Each structure stands twice: as C-alpha cells, then as structure tokens.
Image (cartoon, rainbow, N blue to C red):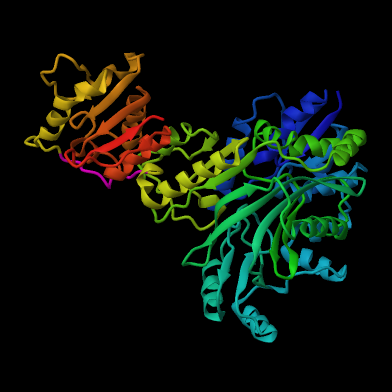
Amino acid sequence: MRNIVIVECVSTGINYVQDILNRNYSPVVLQTKAVESEEGKIYQKLVESSFAAIDADFELIREKDTYEETLEMVRKYDPLLVVPGSEKGVILATKLANDLNLLCNPIENLDSMTLKDKMQERLAEKGLRHIRGRRISSIEEAVDFYDEEGLKEVVVKPIYGAGSVGVRVCINKEEMIRALEEVLDDVNIFGYSDVDFVVQERIDGEEYIVNTVSCAGTHRVTTIWKYAKIKTPEGGHIYDYQTAVNELGLGEADLVEYAYKVCDAMGIQYGPVHGEFMLDERGPVLIEVNCRPMGGGMDAEYLDRLSGQHETDSALDSYLNPDKFNFELRKGYHLYEHSHIKYFIIPNDILAQSNPMIHISDKLKTHYKSVLDEINQNQPFLKTQDFESTGGTVFLIHPDAYEVRKDLDFLRSIEKNAFQLVLSDGSQKRTDLDEAESFEDVRYLLNMIHAYGTTLFVTDQIFDYNNIFQVNPDEIEGINAEFDCVIVNLNESIVNRKDDYIVSLFLKIISKVKVGGLIFIPHSTYQYTANGRLGAEVLVRALDLKLQLPLHDLKGFVIASKQ
C-alpha cells in the first residue's frame, strides 16, 4: 500500500490516520522535533495525548537533526502525499511535498501562509482589505508604529503561533506597552523563544471561522463558525464559546466570497484552510489564516453529524478524489444539526481537588463529549488567558437549536455563578459537621409526604416511618425503581468527600424520581455541597428537572419536579 505522511498529527489532525486507512493507504506520522523549554514540554504533552487518542495503527517517525536527513528519510517511504496535521506541521510538510514533487501549495507563498505579518502584506499586495500592522522586536518599534499611524486600540500577537497564546487586546498606548513588557520575551505555544511580535490596529466586529478545502485552486466551504470571546483585565482575548453557522445571515455571503479571495491571494491549491475573520460595518477582513485542519480536537463522528463530512477526509478528497470534491461542491453548504462548543474560563488560579463538571455535562440532552484536564493536586490550574489555559471544553450538538442554546446558557450560568461545579478546590461549602443540628424540617416533610405517593428517602439518619423506603447512600446503586417523591438527607456521609463524588452521588439519587414526581433537598444537606443551595439547583437542572417555588411552610428546601 502507498504511504501518506502526516506531519505533526495533533488535535483534529489525528482524524487523518483513520481516513487514510479507510482509503486503503498506510498512514505515517512524522513528529517534529521537541523544543527544550517549559512551554515546549507542555506542547509535547499535547502531542502525546493526541497520539494516545488515535484508535488505529500507524507508523511513527521523527524529524532528524537536519532538513536534508528528514527529506531523505521521508523519500524512502515513497509517499503519495505529505500533509500537515496541525499548525506546527505546515512549514515542514509544505517543504517536503514541494521537494518530493507531490501535490501541495506553492513553496514561495509559505511565509504568507504561516506568518501573521506576511499574510496581511500579501492581502495588501492583492488589493484586498487587510489590517494595518508592523512586525516589531522592541517596545520602541511598537510605540513608533502606534504614533505614526495614529492608532487607538491595537492587538499584540506573536507572528507565529496558535490558540491565541500571547495575544493581547490593548485599548491604548499604555496598555500596549504593558502587554509587550509581559509577552515580548515569552516563548510561543510551540516553545520557540525567537519569535517576533506584530502590532496591529484592532478591528471591532464579530469574529468568524471559515473552514475551506481546495482542489486544484477551487475552494469550497466545509463549516462556518462564529466566536464569542471575552477580553480579560490583562488584555487577553479568551474564548467563551463558538457556534456553528447553519444559515447565512446578513453580510455572511460577502464573508465567504472574501474567504475565497484570501485563499486565492495565498495561492492555495490543495487541502484545508482554517481562516479566522472579523466582520464589521466595512465588511470582512482576515485576522489570520492557517493552512491545516481546524483545531479544537474535533472528532470525525462529531463533524459528520454536524455537516455530513469532516475536514481531514474532505481534504484527502481534494488531493485524491476530485470527483467527490466537485460533488460536495455542487451540493452546497448544509448543516444537519446545531452545535455550540463551550470553553470554560477559569476566573483565578485554583488548586483543584476534583472536576465535578465531568458528571454534570454528560447528563445534558445535547451533550456530545467533554474534554476536561486530569486533576493534579500539586499543579494549579492557572487563570484563563488564552485557548491553552481554558478549564475544559464541552461539545453540544442536537437537531433542535433551542435545546442546544439552552444547554449552553446553563453551562455559562454554572461557570459564572457556581464555578466550584466546574473545578472544585473544596471551598464554597460547609466542611464541619454539626452534630447538634436539628432535623425538624425533615421530620415535618416526612409527616406530610404520604400524600405525595411512593417515597425514596436517602438518609444518614434513620427515622421511624414505616411507609417510606429508607436507604443509605451506599445502597443507591441497587435501587432500580422510580418514585413519586425523592428526599435527600445526607451530611455525615458527604461532609469530607470531594465534590466530584458528591455530584455523582446526587445525580444518581435525583434520577430515581419518576415523571411527574418531586425531589426535596433540605438546607441540612445542601450546605455540605459545592455552592450550597445554588449547587443543588444546578444538579436538578442538569437532569432537566424544573425548579419549583419554595413553600411557605417548608423553608430552606430545594424543590424540583420531573416534567
């Protein structure tokens, strides 16, 4: 079988491996050299986790000390194609494909395809709208450009990078100077320390992604996304969520045509392009273009559900099956479901003990998958400043746009009001057990509960009621029935437990209520849970229960019903 080489197979690019096998070719992954810096080691962990996520056979080779050695190594595989699997692989993949006389994009345009200053210069040369900017290596050069151009708000970014790492939005000259003092000597996402920065005028508009694939210079759109970002007090421009664009709105057709012109200006002939754009009152303008599959760790199955295709497979069509490419082109743009992707924003540095969100998100009706970092109690989660420092990602997809938006708003509300249910450090709850606490409110409820029907009472304290089914929390797994009423009365069994355990337990208990039934959680229980009453409300809402009005004679209870 012929070989297809994937350079730097990371994130969404890992989908190439199975796609190549599906076409009866052999995937060969070429890993670029690791960078010996702290950031380089972090990036290497991303590479290793990407490899671990590949559920298919492939051959792994590693970049040699010199380009010439690497070229000869790859030549021996007699590859049919050499393609980049991520941003860091674009330069090497393009050079190898060009020197091996394979289908590829023109080597003379490599700078404009990878460097953020050069891509804007190329647009200017072609007479397309572009963003004013200047490559700088010192604060003095940045100040000179700022003053010469009479700028107000600017964006500072490394000329080579990804994931908004090192990007700062500055509202004035002083903020620009402070940002450059912070980032100018930093390394980029890949661990390189010798990267210059560019200062650009800020375009204030709505931010979009237009993903395309190209075949012999003809371009077609695969997916369009719209970003929602938030500026941090430090000037970072961080991801809140992104939304798949199912139907074109006003001005968005012009955006797509502009994206085609950008591909033409860059000389794109084959493969995927991930373009990021701003749309303001003047129309569209390029932020940056990346000649590789979109990142974000998007599964092939997820993208297939969304659009009936996924970018790595469509990219292989552009090289290997022009008939299929043209068939998809004639079909036009159509998404089959609606999707939001939520990126959790960590409000401050946190030494997390547990990750309760892993149990909450997968209960949502529109949940596809969650990507949440493992907890290392010796390693804090840092305040979110860019894509790499997000607190996790939840993918939502469903045929009903309302349901997807409802779940997105729910996740954003948890993030804002009950962050301990995203990442928990064990605070925001009572941690000392009150041995003398009165349970009269629970007794009052038990005295009146018979009228509600069958009752499951999950409790640490056994009460003398014969008409109520009482169990301790360890027995909940063995309960297969559903009840008209479920009462949670826990304290001793949860007071010193981590929040992910408590969340998992409560969700199991709440799930035992039948349609039309009620759930009751008293203050004597929810005070020991993350974010107290608010946290308990989150858990019943996660299972799509409806919060009920408090009762005048039953104070301090969270009451919910299953619709």
Residue 366 spot, x, y in % from top left: 54, 35
**Is 429 inside the magenta-drawn segment?**
yes
Going 34% across and 17% down the picture, which residue do you hit?
477
Residue 117 shown in magenta: no
Does the rendering let one see residue 75? no
Residue 475 in the image: state x and y as whole percent: 27, 16
Q: Residue at x 86, y 33 (%)?
A: 76
Residues 547 and 64: in front is 547
Residue 321 left/right relative to 507? right
- The residue lying furthest to the front in this view is 451
Q: Is residue 370 visible?
A: yes
Q: Main secondary structure of the magenta part?
A: loop
Residue at 59% across, 63% down: 167
Image quarter hosting the C terminus: top left
In the rendered image, the vertical position of residue 117 relative to residue 219, given as above or below? below
Q: Over which residues does the magenta segment extend? A: 424-432
Left or right for 74, reference 405: right
Report the side of 78 relative to 176 (left or right).
right
Of 272 and 66, nearer the camera is 272
Image point 79% across, 29% down: which residue? 20
Location of residue 506 in the rendering, given as x and y in whole percent from the top left corner: 32, 30
Quarter in which the N terminus is drawn: top right
Left or right: 268 in relation to 15: right
The quarter holding residue 304 reads: top right
Where residue 303 appears, as percent x and y from the top left, is 68, 36
Report the number of discs: 0
Q: Is residue 431 above or below residue 125?
A: above
Q: Is residue 186 above or below residue 209?
A: below
